[in-house]
Every structure is written in C-alpha cells, then in structure tokens.
Image (cartoon, rainbow, N blue to C red):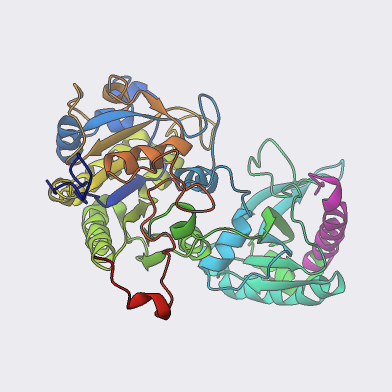
Amino acid sequence: MRQPGYGENQPRLDDDRLPVVLVVLDGLGDRPVPELGDRTPAEAARTPVLDALAARGSSGWHLPFGWGRAPSSELAHWAMFGYADVPFPGRAVLEALGAGIEVPADTAVTHAALRTSSVGPDGRVWITGRAAGWDGDDASALLEALVPVAEAHGARIEVLGGRGEALLVLSGHDTGAVTDSDPFFEDRHPWLRVLACEDAAAPTAEALTALLLEARAVLVEHPVNAARRDRDRPPLDVLTTKWSGARGAVPRFADHVGIPGAAVTSTRLYRGLGALLGMRTRHLPPYLNPRQDLGTELEDRLTAAQELLDEGAAFVHVHTKATDDAGHTKEPRAKLEVLEAADPGLAGLHELAHRAIVAVTGDHATPSTGGVLHTGDPTPLVVAGPTVRTDAVEAFGEGPAAAGWYGALQARELLPLLLGHANRAAFLGHRATPHPTAALPDAPEAMVLPPTLRARRTS
C-alpha cells in the first residue's frame, strides 16, 4: 500500500493492472447431439485442462448478438474487440490486408472467387463447387483473362490465393454497400443479383453487375475451361462476389480501447484485422492435422502470446479455426476429437492465470449437425485470473456454463468484462482522452512544460 500524498487522507493506488489473454476457439458452440448422448461436443469431450480452468474461475454464455442471431466470425470479433459502434469496413478489406495487399481509402472493394456452376431452364445460375487445391494454374489463367474485363469497368483484380480468389478494386466508387452475388447457401439460392444497400451505392451495384455478367461470358468460352471439360473437370465458369466494403477511417486499437493490443493469428482474416487496427501480430499458419497436432499448435500460440506480452502488449488475442472447421464437417465426433486434441495445448493458461486475466470462448456456434452454417446458440465462456471469483461451475461446456456467474454476455460486453478483471476499466466520469475508451488509457497525452518553466522549483 502506498502512502497518501500531501493533504490526502487515502492511500495512493497501487498499479496492479494485469494483461489480458483471450483465446478464441472459432465456432466452439454447438447443439445437443443424439449420438453424443444429447450433449454438445464440448460437453461430451474429455477436457481436463478446460474443466480445471472452469473450476478455478467464472463461467457464462457468450451470445455475440443475442439469441437466434447467427454471426459471422468477422462481425463477432469486431464487437469482441470493442468496435461494435464503429462502422465495419467489410471483410474484403480485412482479407486483402491479411494477404499484404494495400487497400485504397474510400474505394469500393469486394472479394471475388471462381466457382463451378450449372444453368437452370429459367436462366438462373446455380453454384456447384469451387476451385480445388490442384486448380491453381487454371485459376490463375482464368483470373488473368478477366483483367481486361475488370479494367473495362474501371476495376482491377488483385489475386489473393491459389484457389481462384481475388480482390476486386472498383475505382471511382466510394461505397461498397452492396449485396453479395455469392449465395453461401448454394442448394437454396442461385447466383445472386448485386443490389445497392443504400442509394449512394447504386452505381457500384450497376458496375459490379455488368462486370460479373461479362466475366461469365468470357469464362464460359475460355480455352482453359474447354480443356477442363475435355478432362471431365467442371469448368470454373462464374465469378462470385461477397464481403464488399470500403476502407474508411478506423481508430487504432491502442487509441480506441486505450491499451496496446496484439494477436496470434491463424488465417488471413485475423492478420488483416490486426493490420487494420494497428495491432502487433504473430502469424502461425494452422498445423496440418488438427486431431493430432492441435495441442502442440496451441502450445506454440500461447508461447507467441507470452512473447507479445513481453514486448508490451496489454491485450493478446489467440485464435484457432480448427474447431470451426470440425463443426463444418457435420461430424459431431470430429469436433469432439478436435476439442480433446486442443485441451492439453491450453495447459499453459493455468500458470498464466496467476499473473494475467485469461479467457476461453468461441466467436459463434458452428453446429456439427443440421443444415446451418453458424447459429445464435450459446458458446461457453470461462475466465480465470487473480481477481476472478470462483463460481460453482466445475466443468467446461455449454450446459455447465449456464450456471456460471456471468450469465449470458453479448460480444460488445466481453472486452469491458475482461478489462474490469484486469484492473483496467475506464473510470466513467473521468475524461482522459477526447473519445471514451474501454480501458483506463495507458498513455493519455501529458501536459509537458516548456523549457522556460522546467527549471523552476516545485518544492
């Protein structure tokens, strides 16, 4: 305890601020599965490390946007990072930044991908597949053939990867508020018309529609696709678009939240998110076999997180997509096995919880059964650390977490909760920065004496 200052009758506050490490098991949440005894994969999996973390800390449910609302990963993370009230620039911006592509400000961009298709008698185009890993040469040649098509519509193509993915930059259009042509739910919806989401985006939608229709005509007749038909491979004959947006002014994490943030990233999306928000990042690509290697991978991710803490980060995000990928297989036991493989790799959280606030949760539910991508079902949340009380929960999973101290939290509430435990909560009523921050800022601007005043005595 520090002694009171002159004229004060209360002790000065100790600086006992703690760092925060947030581990996100992508798509963690699920639904009860009959073959697992009407339990979710997280409830049925043997996870002694996570069970022990739940037993020493507090638990609850993470419902990113409330009951029944099925979030994408990018929107969930945007809110989890404290940006719920900041306009989202569009995932295409993040994917491009994550690939090392500079995105011009205030210019419409969209993510494009080559797909296979069939045409119905009514002229609607149905998406039947995507470029495979071995289609790299064909995809590159087809995207190259679309360069003059894009240029004719005032756009340019930036290749994102070997599976026919690209960024379309629509020069002269300052808003990307248009709908996706990618149907996502390919067996329910055909290739979709691009529509404006606001009046100002009408020219963007018109230009993109014209570009896509002309691209279709070029792709159908291209020699590469003719050769694919001869080899009994489906032609990559349609270009779909999604995640459109524009890069506007977005505050840096350190300025918006008030503390330096960092991320141990696993995919292009999160590397791009870190780049946009000015966060220090360590990129570790996913290991090849998650059912065998995920434990080692997570150990390495936690080691990288500690390095980022040592370099001055006060908040570190650690991510793995393996749980989400397992959910999308629609094999509940596969997701259970991935969770069991992940568990030993999180053992380092127990030691870290003596000197930091650690949290494990998911960004959304990815059910391992049913005809859904993501759902608004709850995902478990557990938090441990020196200031976290122990509640009655003794196991990890959706069911046990329902009895936890936190109840149900939305994504925008998660960061303030963790910062509060870290003794970093912004003090409401104190205005240290022009804009409110979620944390008591680490480095508000100081009043600096001019040289003429520095030599004068203060005591």
Does the image show residue 337? no
At x 37% / y 23%, what residue is drawn? 32
Residue 45 in the image: state x and y as whole percent. Answer: 24, 34
At x 56% / y 62%, what residue is drawn? 95
204 magenta-colored: yes
Residue 126 vertical placement versus 94 (above, below):
above
* Left or right of 449 in this view: 148: right
The image quarter in which residue 143 lies: bottom right
Residue 309 in the image: state x and y as whole percent. Answer: 26, 61
Which image quadrant: the C terminus?
A: bottom left
Q: How many marks are shown on the rendered structure?
A: 0
At x 35% / y 45%, what residue is drawn? 25
Residue 302 in the image: state x and y as whole percent. Answer: 24, 57
Residue 145 in the image: state x and y as whole percent. Answer: 75, 76
Residues drawn in magenta: 194-219
Report the front residue among 107 and 179.
107
Residue 384 vertical placement versus 434 (above, below):
above
* Left or right of 11 in this view: 210: right
Report the front residue among 206 and 386.
386
SS assignment for the magenta stretch, majority: helix
2 magenta-colored: no
Report the front residue among 43 and 236.
43
Report the front residue among 36 and 413.
413
* Left or right of 395 in this view: 335: right
Does the image show residue 300? yes
* Left or right of 303 in this view: 179: right
The image quarter in which residue 43 lies: top left
